[in-house]
Image (tube, rainbow, N blue to C red):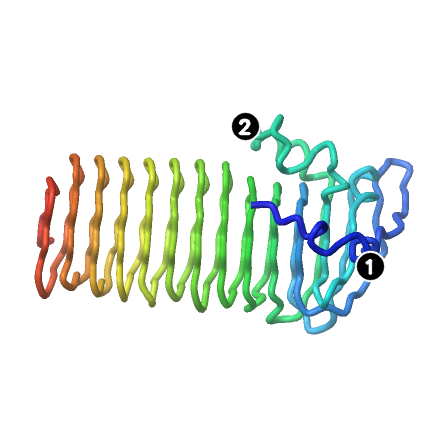
Amino acid sequence: MRGNWKSLLGGAAVASLLILPAIAADSGWVVWPSRSYNANSLKIDDIVGTVIVRVTGGPMTVDVSGAKERVNGLKVGVEGGVLKIDGSEASENQAVWNWRDWFNFPNYVDHRTDNLTIKISVPRGTNIDVDDLVGDANIGDTQGALRFEAAASKATIGRVASANISLGGSGKLDLAAVTGDLKLEVGGSGKVTVGPTGSVKADIAGSGTGVFGPIAGGLHLSIAGSGDVTAARVNGPVHIDIAGSGSVKIADGTADPLHVDIMGAGNFAFGGVAVDPHIDAVGSGSVKLKSYRGHLDSEGMADVKIGD
């Protein structure tokens, strides 16, 4: 999951990254002077702290504040048109993937993320890649492509063109809207809430939760465990795979076609029209369809009910 771009770029490229001078305060809290960068995309890697991305009409700017030992090791620089902000050295002994803290993410966040705040201003349409984040994030309506991977986070994200989201451990993420495709991975007890989207491909593990608005271009969903997913409406192909006691409820739409696989005690309910539904279930799971057209194919031990 971690991308080691430093080894890929080579020593010369890494050497060009800047360790900006910090303005020290008596309290040990430091603030970097605001600085502008000529770049067309943003990469944020290995940050334990708070990340704020604002959308403006000008060049990219970076403002940093935090504890001296955390700020001084932060690296910021432009490589091939990409503004890169790397915190791996700033948190060398507190790294995101430190196995000693692996099972203690909630306490990890409470005690560490208020020691570093990074504020970035970007033009509309900027592509953003956030990797290995532990902490809060607030990203505006960039309307660009977004990749967001966090071990534990409370994040609010505006409108984007496409999104690839991975939320592990605990956390909550609110995403306003995705014009195109959304790829989503939720592990542990994370919760993701999404507004209108194009198409969705989602994997929910553990007790994760997904809440979706209208999905215009189809849904491919896999649940392993007790995950819970709801959607206001889905149009297009719908493929649901539940292993365990997961639950899926779709209020409306036209699933063309609908394919449901259940192994265990999972439940699926669809309040729209299912086209040529194929249902295969082993265990005590149940399937409820408001209506269908075409051919209904049911295999296994599924409890299938049609009607309100």
Please indicate whether residue 152 sits to the left or right of residue 213 in the image: right
Q: Quadrant of the N terminus?
A: top right
Measure the alpha-carbon separation of dots 1 and 2: 36 Å
Q: Which mark is residue 240?
A: none
Query: What residue is disc 1 on?
Result: 34
Give residue 186's position: percent from left, percent from top: 44, 44
- Whether residue 95 sits left or right of residue 75 in the image: it is left
Which residue is tagged 2?
103
Going by the numbered disc 2, the residue's amino acid type is Phe
Residue displayed at 46% across by 64% down: 178
Q: Residue at x 11, y 47 (%)?
A: 299
Which quadrant holds residue 182? bottom left
Count how many numbered circles sit on residues in the image: 2
Mark 1 closeness class: few <14, some 14–19, many ≥20 residues within 10 Å:
few
Residue 280 higher or lower than 179, as above or below: above
Residue 301 horizontal/vertical position (percent): 11, 40
Q: Earlier in the sequence, mark 1 or mark 2?
A: 1
The percent coordinates of residue 287 (x first, y second) are 16, 47
> Percent position (x, y) of residue 140?
59, 61
At mark 2, the secondary structure is loop
At mark 1, the secondary structure is loop
Among all residues in the image, which is located at the extreme top? 100
Q: Which mark lies nearer to you, 1 or 2? A: 2
How many residues crowd around disc 2 within 10 Å: few (fewer than 14), some, or many (20 or more)? few
Look at the picture and state if 171 lies above or below 278.
above
